[in-house]
Every structure is written in C-alpha cells, then in structure tokens.
Image: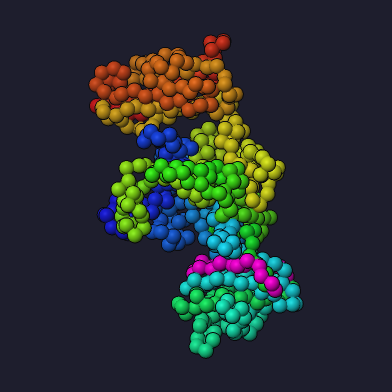
Amino acid sequence: LQGTPSIFAPGLDQDGHGTHVMGIEAGNGRCGAGYTGVAPAASIVFTKISFGSDFGTDIMLDGVNYIFKKAEELGMPAVVNLSLGYNAGSHDGTSVACQAIDALTGPGKIIVNSAGNSAYQEDSSGKRYYQHVGFEATEDEQMFDMMVYHTGVIELWYEPPGNIDVAVSAFDFWTGGHVERSDFVSPGESVSNQGFYDGSEIASYSIDATEMSNENNGARHVIITITPQFWTYYFYNWTIVVKGDCYFDAWPGESGYVLFMDERPGVRGGDSRLSLTYPAYAKEVIAVGSYVTKNVWYDVYGRRQTDWNAEVGKISYFSSQGPSRRPDITGPKPEIVAPGQYIASAFSAQTYAMGPDNYDTEMLTHSYYYWLAAGTSMSSPHVAGAVGLLLQCNPSLTPDDIEQILAQSALSDEYTGTGHNDVYGYGKLDIQAALKAIDTGGQNELGLDLQADYPVYDASDTLEIYAQAANAGAERGVDFGMAIVQPDGSLLYYPNWTADYAVTGLYLPTRFSVQDLLVFECEVQQGAPLSESGNYIVFAAFLDQSSGTILGNLSATTFEVDM
C-alpha cells in the first residue's frame, strides 16, 4: 500500500490501531523487546478499509473477499481478523450483511471478530451508559432514557404478533422534568420531521414503525431518529416511551451516537446483555471477548501505571456480552475470550502524521517500538493467530470445526465457570490445548510444522527457520534435526541431531518440550552453508533421545536464495 505523508494517505496507519492489532496476531518480535505475536511466522496480507471509525459494510466485505481470494491464489488457508464493529441491525444473524460475511467463509476461510466494547461506559460519578436496552412492554407506559450526540438513531426489534406503540420525549435534566412528548406511533404508522419545542425548537424527530415483517427474519422493526439543536446537549436528555404486549430489544442505529442511561426512579435502564456488535453476531464468525491479563506496567518514562479497576483474570468491563437476539440461528455468542487488557504490541511509525494535538511530544519523536492498548480489538487477534496455527495443522478446517476446537480446549476457572455463558463464552483461549485437540488425520502424529521466515533471501540476509510440534506431551526429551536440500540436489545437514542450544545457532528453551517454537538461524552469504542461488528444501524431524527413533513424519518447507 502506498501513500504520501498526508492525513488521509491510504498507506499510513496514523492512529496505530491496525499496526497494534497485526502485531498481536503475527508480529515476529525482531525488535528484541520480548513481544512476539501468536503466529510469528505467518504470511501477512491486509487491507485498510477506513480512516478512523468511518467504514462501510460493503468496503469491509470487499476487504475480506480480497484476502480470501489472494490466499486462494497462493494455495493457502487464511484467517481474517476484524477488530471493528457497530451496533446497528437486528442482532440475529439474518441481515443481508450477516448473510454476506457468512457466505465468504468455508474450509480454510475463517473470520475472527472482536465482540465489541459496548458492555458499558462509566463516568467519573459512577453513572453507567449502555448500548442495549430490552424489557417486556405492557399496557402501562414505560420509559428509558438516552444521551444523543448530534443525531441519534435508535432501532427497536420485536417478534410478531406482538405490538408496541412508541413515543419520544425531551427531558430537561436541570429541572428534572419532561418539557414535551410526542403522540404514540403504532405498528404500521410513521411520522417524520416533527419538532420539539421548549420556547424555541430544540430538536426534530421521526418515528418509522411501518415495517411489520422484515424480509430477512419476519420481525417487526421501529426506527426512531432524533436530531437535537447543537446546544441542547448541555440541557436535555431524551426519553423513549413504550407500551404494548411483548418483549423488545433496542440498540443505537448506524448513524449518529446514542448511549442508553442507567435506571432511575420510574425509568428503565440499559444493560450489557446483547451488546455484541456486527459482524460478531454473524453465525460463521468467531466472536471474541476480552479479559484482563495486566493491570500494572511501567510507561516510557519509567513511571509505574496501575488500573485499579482492572482485576487480572476477570472479564474486561467494556467487553460486549451475548447472547445474540436469536441464538437459535447464530449459535452461542461470544464463542471465547482472550487477553485484551492491557496488551503490548507494535507501535505504528506513522503516528506523527496526526500532529501534536493528538499525541504527546514523546510519541512524535519516539524511539520505541511498542505501546499498550486495551479492547476486544486486542483480544480478537490472539484468537486469529491461534486459528492460523490450527490451519497450519489442518488447512481444511471450517468455522464450525474451529468453534468446536476452541470450545473443547477453552480454559475454565473461577471467573468463567463451566460450560458456555454470555460473558466468557466457552471460556478463555488456551492455544496449546487447542493445538492438542486438533485432528491431524494421522498425516503427522506430532503435528510438526516447519516454515521459513521469508520465501526469498538475499546474500546479506539472515535465514530463519521456525519449527513447532503441536501434538505431543510437554517436557519430552527430544533432539531436533534438520536437513537442507541444496539446488544441486545434495544434502546439507545443518545442524546434525542436537539438543544443545549452544550449537549452530539453534535456540532451545531451558525447559524444552516439542511444543516449543524452535528458531534456527544462519547467515546467507557466498560460501557455506548456503552457497548457491536457487530453491532450497528444508526437512526436519524430532528424535526420541531414549530410543533413537524418529518421532512423527518429516515436515518440509521451501525458500529461495538470490546471490
């Protein structure tokens, strides 16, 4: 991707979000600070679909389709991470947008998505704000409050043959009273561009309840739009009044910005349930929540930072919760949780492009490579990286296979409880357990995988070969052997069988097991060990120290040297 040093340059990551996310999923740790992505030897293809949070569903789907098409051209499986989402829609997996993203998935085509950061927000006084509200409408009038920034769109969804009448009201939070209320709009009716007045016009509103049977799910649907005058934010909140005979759910629409407020006397409050964002609630998408793995760290100035509200091991307060509106269609949501608060990962080199109003002086002249962030945007790439490792073992895994493996291998503890729930899903991501759970079909009983860091090397490069075996018990005494077939067909054994980490640049952890990631390095230069231009083939295997027998089948990879 190419661009110019402009605020809208398509090739730059000015706010650092995409770079941070990709580092978690597949960072190779070359900076030497000890932070490596989940799948550090993965091939990377990415698309930039937006500037800031302004993206369209069609653009996002184009990006996903591009990645899967590119992987197909290369004959590779692919996992797409989507650290994004929004709240509009029926939240039941039936929309055209959900159907479209589900249709892109299949064997070797997996989509992992952040569950969303919509559980709740909290201000300095302890008041909470939500992006979902839902309760049983009755013949008695009931109300719920919301804050609206600029334009607010609210969507209500409920099942026939139920009926709900809807009205809107302005609430003066300085005087504590309602200043005006609209007439009720019944199912099948609508009003548009009506004015709210408190001396002068303070807002306009529209209510569209004409959709009696949505073409995708048969549900009834109400869209409420409130457009306040710019200054009313400081004086008014807004109230939705409902009466009817059925349960309904409401979320902010795609346009504008709405937050539902806490309960107060006589007024229902929002809640954290059903707060998953699109496309996390699509059936074939793996939705990932966030839990806390760090609450103390030292910043770039050496100052100790502490988040006293974050309890290690517990769900992140912001992590969106399930279920979907129709779990019978989408299945249980979310599927799993992973580390998302606080995560160190790559810091974009282009943050300076945003200017000094957005970053402190240290960020403008940074000499460091990592920063900390929190969100389900950070938990999702942990799972995407894990799925990449699973696809290495079996490139034909389907979304259902992945969900089953993650569910089977998920960690349960005092926080998650056992079984699936709407907060932690099936539990916490356990990558090693997931790799053990995968069925390799007997092709390689150890699940040995071998990969060159780059497909092409020049004379001045360092060759890096990664090896890992997934399906074997920990702390098993093994030696590791590698053989390289040179372009002339001759074999170069480099190194020979060894468990000595000091020999020939083969790095083995102190408590080594065959599940650990091995990294073999050697210089590419004129002369031994790699002396010719052309294609090289690498074979590797593990040797049982006690019996001297080879464990599992050989694994192979290829790379090219250009002298």
Q: From the image, which quarter does the C terminus lie in?
A: top left
132 part of magenta stretch: no
Picture residue at 44% right of the left edge, 60% below the top = 53
From the top left corner, tell me how far across and down residue 294 is, in percent: 53, 43
Q: Nearer the viewer, residue 562 or 24?
A: 24
Picture residue at 48% right of the left edge, 23% below the top = 509
Picture residue at 62% right of the left edge, 70% below the top = 156
Q: Nearer the viewer, residue 128 or 456?
A: 128
Task: Specify start and end residues of the magenta stretch as a single range.
Answer: 246-266
Picture residue at 51% right of the left edge, 35% below the top = 389
> In the orientation shown, which residue stands out farthest toward the bottom?
199
From the top left corner, tell me how far across and down residue 148 is, in percent: 52, 72
From the top left corner, tell me how far across and down residue 351 is, in percent: 34, 52
Q: Is residue 331 visible?
A: no
From the top left corner, tell me how far across and down residue 123 is, in percent: 55, 62
Rendering quarter of residue 172: bottom right
Task: Name the chief secondary structure element in magenta.
Answer: strand
> In the orientation shown, which residue stands out farthest toward the front?
303
Give the vertical position of 253 relative to 10 (above or below): below
Give the vertical position of 186 relative to 533 (above or below): below
Q: Nearer the viewer, residue 93 or 134?
A: 134
Q: Is residue 172 visible?
A: yes
